[in-house]
Amino acid sequence: MLLTPYLLFNGNCREAMTFYQTCLGGELTFQTVEDVPDEYQWPDTLNRMIMQTTLIKESFTLKASDLSYENTLVKGNAVTFMLNCATHEEVKSVMTKLLTGGVVIQDLNRTSDNAWLTSLMDRYGHYWTIFCHADGD
């Protein structure tokens, strides 16, 4: 079994997922509504919306879409992405990138078990906890 996070956006899915690719790396693919076969009828106003996008890297898959039920998209902190990095430098690098337009929730500090840990909310309202158990300054 594999759990894959699936994010919903309101018209800015392409921008957000391109931002995540810049921060995390990986291969990004998009399918717009207009790419869907003709037997599925969608209003022309949705043609440029992202039906589904997938960001794949060795260790994760992240999916997203612009399509959600009207008035049901609610951002909150009930879900946090936990990103386990290999080095302290990787933590700092990813943190800096994700913080572009975002907000620090918890400063980067050592934990009681000597791991590095930080928490933030990115500019799209998604929460991230980034850590590593590697030594580093």
Image (cartoon, rainbow, N blue to C red):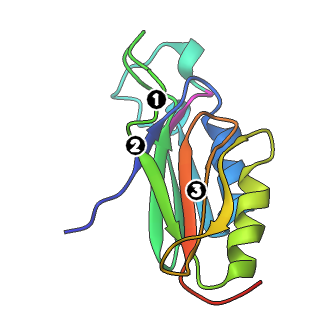
Which residue has dot 2 on it?
Answer: 79
Image position of 55 with respect to 15: above or below: below
Crowd band around label 2 with a 10 angstrom C-alpha radius: few (<14), some (14–19), many (20+): few
Q: Nearer the viewer, residue 31 or 91?
A: 91
Query: Which of the 4 quarters of the picture holds residue 3?
Result: bottom left
Q: Nearer the viewer, residue 20 or 100?
A: 100
Magenta-colored stretch includes residue 110: no
> Which numbered disc covers residue 76?
1
Q: CA distance from mark 1 to mark 3?
A: 26 Å
Residue in the image at 50% along x and 74% along y = 112
The local secondary structure at tag 3 comes to strand
Is 20 on the left-hand or right-hand side of 137?
Answer: left
Image marks 2 and 1: residues in contact by CB distance under 8 Å: yes
Is 56 on the left-hand or right-hand side of 109?
Answer: left
Q: CA distance from mark 2 to mark 1?
A: 7 Å
Q: Which residues are drawn in magenta?
A: 48-52
> Which numbered disc covers residue 21?
none
Query: Number of callouts in the render?
Result: 3
Residue 24 in percent (x, y) is at 66, 65
Residue in the image at 58% along x and 28% along y = 49
Quadrant of the snapshot with the C terminus? bottom right
Is 3 on the left-hand or right-hand side of 121?
Answer: left
Residue in the image at 50% along x and 31% along y = 33
The amino acid beneath tag 2 is: Val
Tag nearer the camera, 1 or 3? 1
Q: Residue furthest left?
A: 1
Residue 118 in percent (x, y) is at 62, 59
